[in-house]
Amino acid sequence: MIAIQCTDLVKRYGQMTAVDKLNLEIYKKECFGLLGPNGAGKTTTAEMLEGLLKPDSGQITVLGDTWGGSGDRRLRERLGVALQQTELTDRLTVAETIGLFRSFYSRSKPVDEIIEILGLVEKRKTWVSRLSGGERQRLALACSLVGEPEVLFLDEPTTGLDPQARLWIWEVILAFKNNGGTVFLTTHYMEEAERLCDRVGIMDRGRLIALDTPEALIDSLNAAQIIELSTDKPLEQSKLEGLDGIERVVLEETGGYTIKVAHLETTLSDVLAEVDRQGATIVYLKTRRTTLEDVFVNLTGRALRDE
Ligand SMILES: Nc1ncnc2c1ncn2[C@@H]1O[C@H](COP(=O)(O)OP(=O)(O)O)[C@@H](O)[C@H]1O
Ligand SMILES: [Mg+2]
């Protein structure tokens, strides 16, 4: 059931401890996300699990095997790895690049099949140097998938991509998972983690500070979803409070209302109907839900992203 396990994993760079006694268990067929800000230790962790970086101490097991023995090559064949910065050769075409990676594996998908899956058909003969950022990321993913891996390691697979390129990559990752693959990914996008991951570990300064399903992490804040609204005339607050699914109604000093609800999707329309019934008109409306970002801020007092 367990695909990857690490115990008391430590990596130091000089005085700095990049990964500090990390314990993780990643199950087969799950998508596990390591979420954290820049410098948290995500890449260092991924590279140790991938067998590319030697830990200072601690144990790693991948698909029942350990790194550093005679079985490394065989184990590597069962894994697909896309590094944070993939060094692809500029003077190869897309098809040649995939063909090159394919030659590393004894078992592999045909080049054209992988090109099709990643939506690179039109770029088949394009030089790597001519690809956009999104296309390069897709090519890196193609190279990691060509050996039909059991476990896929992806380090920030969509960083810097536009939403459309990101969606494409998400679909490919989800399809891999739905076919029984195991995914270990790192990201600093909470939305990516929420969308793809069955479980998320939140990492900060080399340590794991939380680990659960995205839903459970968000629920742990006990923070409901929120409707903020104001109307052209005061509302009968008790009627709002009487609606199903309302947790709390607060009349703000500005005259607007902040309404906490359990399920925004079902309650918003009831709230709007009630406002209408009271003969009032909405002049301001905003809804928001709690996210993994709120979880991180709550745990650390800092924002996940530095931009
Ligand atoms: N080769 C290295 N030499 C020195 N310090 C490093 C090296 N690689 C990473 N670090 C440091 O280790 C910490 C964790 O880095 P990294 O694992 O890349 O974090 P993340 O991927 O979460 O952004 C950072 O403070 C980074 O500067
Ligand atoms: Mg990184």
Image: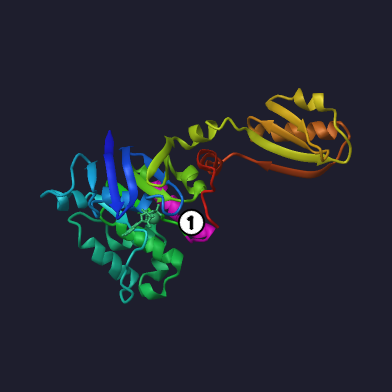
Q: Quadrant of residue 260?
A: top right
Q: Is residue 302 magenta?
A: no
Q: Amino acid at mark 1?
A: Arg
Residue 176 seen by the camera: no
Task: Tell me which segment is drawn in magenta.
Answer: 160-176
Q: Nearer the viewer, residue 190 or 117?
A: 190
Q: Residue at x 67, y 31 (%)?
A: 261
Q: Residue furthest left?
A: 70
Left or right placement of residue 132 versus residue 62 in this view:
right
Q: Is residue 173 magenta?
A: yes
Q: Quadrant of the C terminus?
A: bottom right
Q: Nearer the viewer, residue 193 or 271?
A: 193
Q: Compared with residue 128, is residue 170 higher up or lower down, i.e. above or below? A: above
Q: Residue furthest bottom?
A: 91
Q: Secondary structure at mark 1?
A: helix
- Ligand 2 - quadrant of the structure image: bottom left
- Please name the residue that numbered disc 1 is placed on: 166
Residue 277: x %, y % from top left: 85, 31
Residue 65: x %, y % from top left: 18, 42
Residue 97: x %, y % from top left: 29, 68
Badge 1 crowding class, 10 Å Cα cut-off, few under 14, some 14 to 19, many 20 or more, is some
Q: Quadrant of residue 94?
A: bottom left
Residue 258: x %, y % from top left: 74, 35
